[in-house]
Image (cartoon, rainbow, N blue to C red):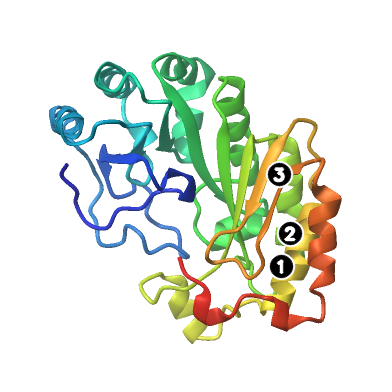
Amino acid sequence: MRYEGNIFRPPSEAYSLIVQVTIGCAHNDCTFCSMFKDKQFRVRKIDEVLEDLEGARHMYRRIDRVFLADGDALVLKDADLIRILQRIRYLFPECQRVGIYGSPQDVLRKGVDSLKRLKDEGLGIVYIGAESGSDKVLTDVKKGATAAQITEAIQIIEAAGIPASVTFISGLAGTDGWEDHAIKTGELISAAQPSYVGLLTLMIDPAAPIYEEIEQGRFTLLPPLTVVEETLLMIENINVEKRCVFRSNHASNYLSLRGNLPEDKEKMLAALREVRGHKELLKNEYFRAL
């Protein structure tokens, strides 16, 4: 296997074979993100990707999952993705799922019919970074998509029969707009109805552009107990009709939450209310990590 630069994958892809089909991120302008700032975006040659898959077949006896990286691998042309998916199915008949990162822009450009074809070829899950349901926050962090576009993209993925795993970030609005961030995020989840929601908590890498905003006093990080209040308000505003797996148990989170919505909504709200005024119950900063 050949890799360029640091490799990133969703937590649920920890035991997957990771294959780079793109290098870096086509957007790469988000102020909170430093993951791909050291890379110039490009699409890898498909023959190289297929060679890597062949090499992995010789290296590993069993591959249960494959994850296609980097930041928005769904940017590839359908024909190229189909070639990759077909080769995965041929080489790894035991493979249970192929996952991929996709930006809202990628999904909107492809549409339902395109994603249905990719599903038929073996695409099993699309990870999409929504970050917030607030248009103000999305503009501030230079996400490059509106809440309405993100909602539509998630709906397209789900309509194609592919589970959408959507990530949001606590604390992304700072101290000034956390209530709007929480409410609008809950409303976006309610409208989009994704299969999976992952909630991370903002952590700052000095290489991320937002670090300069903090240093200049233009952005103030949300205190841990206010993060709890923000999460509580967010979940209060989530009303989904179908089952949504909710996870807020990433290493960055101050409090670990996991449950299925809507059935575990009150249980998670109760856990958040319990730690109000009890900062000692939250994870120490030393143990938080990206």
> Where residue 178 is drawn, which disc sits there?
1
Alpha-carbon distance for marks 2 and 1?
A: 6 Å
Would you call the spot at circle 1 few (<14 residues within 10 Å), some (14-19), or many (20 or more)? many
Residue linked to disc 3: 188
Residue linked to disc 2: 182
Q: Secondary structure at mark 2?
A: helix
Q: Position of residue 182 (x, y in %)?
A: 73, 59
Indicate which disc, 3 or 2, sits on the residue closer to the N terminus. 2
Query: Decide: marks 2, 1 in contact (CB < 8 A)?
Result: yes
Q: Is residue 243 above or below residue 90?
A: below
Q: Amino acid at mark 3?
A: Leu
Image side of residue 200 versus residue 242, left or right: left
Q: Amino acid at mark 1?
A: Trp
Would you call the spot at circle 3 few (<14 residues within 10 Å), some (14-19), or many (20 or more)? many
Alpha-carbon distance for marks 3 and 2?
A: 10 Å
Query: Decide: marks 3, 2 in contact (CB < 8 A)?
Result: no
Can you tell which quarter of the image residue 223 is in? bottom right
